[in-house]
Image (cartoon, rainbow, N blue to C red):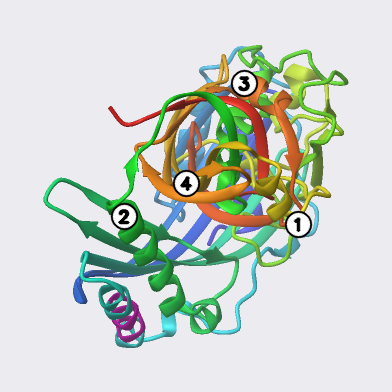
Amino acid sequence: MLSNTSIERILAAALSHGGDFSEVFIERTKATSVSLLNGIVEATGSNLDMGIGIRILEGDRSVYVYSNDIYNEEKLIRMAKNASASLSQAPAGETIYLTPQIEYFSQRYEICPSEVSKSEKVNKLRKSGETAKAYSSLITQTSASTSDVEKDVWIANSDGLYVTDHRCRTRVMIQAIASSEEDKQYGYFGPGSGEGYEFFERLDTDELARKAAKIAATMISAKPCPSGKMPVVIGNGFGGVIFHEACGHALEATAVGIKSSYFTGMKGKQIASPIVTAYDDAKIAKEWGSYEVDDEGTPSQTTLLIKDGILNSYLIDKIGSRRMDEPSTGCARRQNYGCAPTSRMSNTFIAAGESKPEDIIADTEYGIYAANMGGGSVDTSTGEFNFAVNEAHMIRNGKICEAVKGATLIGKGNEVLMNIDRVGSDLKLAQGVCGSVSGNIAVDVGQPTIRVSEITVGGQA
């Protein structure tokens, strides 16, 4: 590991030819994984990675370089100087001194996941696959996997900041596929937590397997979904993926700071129904997307994005702060040392409302119940989206009726926000991986059950 003196020299070298701010990000990551297909071990893996990223800012311009050689000070200084030379305005050449190190523990573990035998993990995963297979004769394939990451980071910059953080995340993924002569359908769950192996130990993987198999078996015999504009009730938990994709990304300074978001200049204005309040909260204990300090060394926070339909805040990193003349919200994140940080979501959700979920259904004469959302595509400059629904049912006369397949939800993020006319009391978070310009990161999406008064539903051809 580099000494404080070495880091100070690298930071100074990064400003030797140009730039007004420099930053060093050092990372050591240990990851393990196990995956099974139909009860047979398909792959196991263990990985150890170490590296360093050096970033230089000049106004709202930036240069980023990285290396997996964290011990060769001379090489890193040369790399920093070369990067600095691509900028124009050199500072006065002040000596940089780091303040005493601040140590954070974003995630603590009770059981170190990399020290648990792979055979123990395999046995539990195999049992969940057997449970899914036994649910129905329609289940033709099962898969189950677990992965964990232990990460230590060191962040220092030319302002003298020096922090370290210890992070650990564990995730389990279970899928069941049902087949008929004409079709295949799947059910899937992928819970994760900011903990160690103790999360996997207490998780009821058999129950998850049964739920995944039920979705797959139900949808294989479902009728084609009708199409057209209609009310849609979206279930809690992963239903929040629509807000995350179609709205959350448009609130990040990555887009707002360069005026490529349809929410640019909308702060203080109504962008959603008055019954909608939404947060990005990185401080929820043990959540998959939580952290104590971001990848620029700024402490995390709870950010109120929307209050009673009014846009209250954006998600802002250091460059975004310079572009927008607003303070950082502690949301700069990156996949690893090979990526420069930028503004990203953590645990992003629509807050709980006052309606009981069953009352929302009972008050809907006709429409679609989107019980389980799938993937989709979004244009963050316009908010236009297209999302698949993995599990959908018709609503008739206030009751959930037959399953329908091939459903897609089509619309614009800002229009959907304005058309939310009921918000349930059953807030739930769900885990996922978000991809953007700084790589893939752990995030939670979430919401209670909500009703959108009108949205375009695409059916099966």
Disc assigned to residue 186: 2
Q: Which residues are magenta?
A: 122-129
Quadrant position of the C terminus in the picture:
top left
Residue 380 at what x, y percent from top left? 55, 21
The front one of 259 and 3 is 259
Q: Which residue is mark 3?
A: 255
Q: Residues within 10 Å of mark 3 (few under 14, many from 20)?
A: some
Which sits earlier in the primary sequence, circle 4 or circle 2? 2
Where disc 1 sits, the SS reads: loop
Give the distance between the C-alpha atoms of the residues marked 4 and 3, in whole angstroms: 36 Å
Tag 4–tag 3 contact (CB < 8 Å): no
Residue under the image location 65 percent in, 40 percent down: 364
Tag 3–tag 2 contact (CB < 8 Å): no
Where disc 2 sits, the SS reads: strand
194 to 82, vertically: above or below: below
Give the distance between the C-alpha atoms of the residues marked 4 and 2, in whole angstroms: 16 Å
Disc assigned to residue 283: 1
427 to 277, vertically: above or below: below
Residue 286 at what x, y percent from top left? 66, 67
Which sits earlier in the primary sequence, circle 3 or circle 2? 2
Which sits earlier in the primary sequence, circle 4 or circle 1? 1
Give the distance between the C-alpha atoms of the residues marked 4 and 1, in whole angstroms: 35 Å
Eye-nearest disc, 2 or 1: 2
Q: Which residue is mark 4?
A: 393
Which SS does the magenta portion mostly show? Answer: helix
Q: Residues within 10 Å of mark 4 (few under 14, many from 20)?
A: many
Three-letter amino acid code at the position of disc 3: Ala
Tag 3–tag 1 contact (CB < 8 Å): no
Residue under the image location 45 percent in, 61 percent down: 190
Three-letter amino acid code at the position of disc 4: His
Three-letter amino acid code at the position of disc 1: Lys
